[in-house]
């Protein structure tokens, strides 16, 4: 029996995710002009109507790509939130250094820069970037800090603010150096900076905790 017009194949979601995964490098490529839906169809080896069937438009492709990235990164983020080493003086500097490694060696920087470029000041792509790429990473660090606080390894703190304080400057440094070419005009050893920055944040958290304990 022929399929009713507009209905979905039984493997619709599997095919949609496979297409989104295949389209991620082209969609988030920051080396040239953003790809059109026609260009993306060419990359995937399918027709524009096929892309419209699965995603609607280019913004739908963007949301689907970020959702796939979120799913693929979930095991890593879960491990990040539940480390084997409970010493924050080792754990937090190592976390920030590992972020620089993942950014550079495994393509996180390209994904982040591409998603940021497409998402800024856009009503749907911006929230997709926040919900599927930025917030999962921040929330994993928040859960990590919650674990350290619950174990008595750190004083009580606003873990959302602490996660932003930890990650924000390092992400900015990576964007400055790698994605915006700042390495050519003002180079920075980002890994060394990350370790120093982690120590500063830890000192601030402990000072704030000690101040609260004496009040």
Image: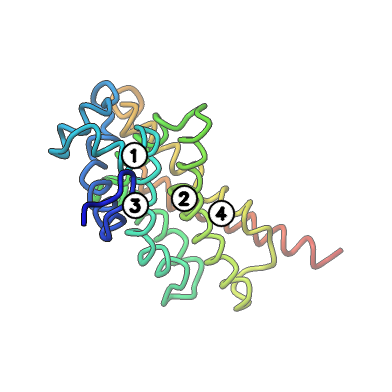
- Quadrant where the N terminus sits is bottom left
Question: Percent x, y for residue 35?
Answer: 26, 27
Question: Percent x, y for residue 80?
Answer: 42, 66
Residue located beneath label 2 in the image: 196
Is 135 rendered above or below residue 58?
below
Residue located beneath label 4 in the image: 163
Q: Please give the count of numbered marks on the rendered protein.
A: 4
Distance between the Cα atoms at labels 2 and 1? 39 Å
201 and 30: which one is in front? 30
Disc nearer the start of the sequence (3/1): 1
**Residue at (31%, 36%) from the top-left corner?**
52
Distance between the Cα atoms at labels 4 and 1? 29 Å
* Callout 4 secondary element: helix
Disc nearer the start of the sequence (4/3): 3
Q: How is the image coloured?
A: rainbow
Q: Which label sits in the foreground, 3 or 1?
A: 1
Q: Which label sits in the foreground, 4 or 1?
A: 1
**Residue at (28%, 53%) from the top-left corner?**
17
- Quadrant where the C terminus sits is bottom right
**Numbered badge on residue 61:** 1
Q: Badges 2 and 4: C-beta atoms under 8 Å apart?
A: no
**Residue at (63%, 59%) from the top-left corner?**
159
Residue located beneath label 3 in the image: 69
Disc nearer the start of the sequence (4/1): 1
Q: Badges 4 and 3: C-beta atoms under 8 Å apart?
A: no
């Amino acid at each position: 029996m022929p399929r009713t017009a507009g209905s979905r194949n039984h493997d619709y979601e599997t095919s949609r995710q496979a297409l989104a995964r295949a389209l991620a490098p082209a969609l988030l490529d920051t080396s040239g002009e953003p790809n059109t839906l026609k260009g993306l169809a060419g990359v995937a080896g399918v027709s524009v109507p096929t892309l419209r069937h699965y995603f609607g438009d280019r913004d739908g492709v963007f949301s689907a790509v970020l959702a796939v990235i979120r799913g693929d990164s979930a095991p890593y983020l879960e491990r990040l939130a539940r480390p084997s080493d409970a010493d924050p003086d080792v754990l937090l500097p190592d976390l920030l250094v590992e972020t620089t490694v993942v950014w550079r060696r495994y393509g996180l920087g390209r994904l982040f820069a591409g998603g940021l470029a497409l998402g800024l000041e856009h009503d749907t792509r911006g929230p997709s970037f926040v919900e599927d790429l930025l917030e999962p990473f921040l929330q994993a660090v928040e859960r990590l800090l919650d674990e350290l606080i619950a174990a008595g390894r750190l004083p009580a703190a606003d873990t959302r603010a602490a996660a932003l304080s930890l990650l924000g400057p390092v992400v900015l440094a990576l964007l400055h150096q790698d994605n915006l070419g700042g390495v050519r005009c003002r180079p920075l050893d980002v890994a060394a900076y990350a370790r120093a920055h982690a120590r500063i944040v830890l000192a601030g958290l402990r000072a704030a905790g000690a101040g609260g304990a004496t009040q």
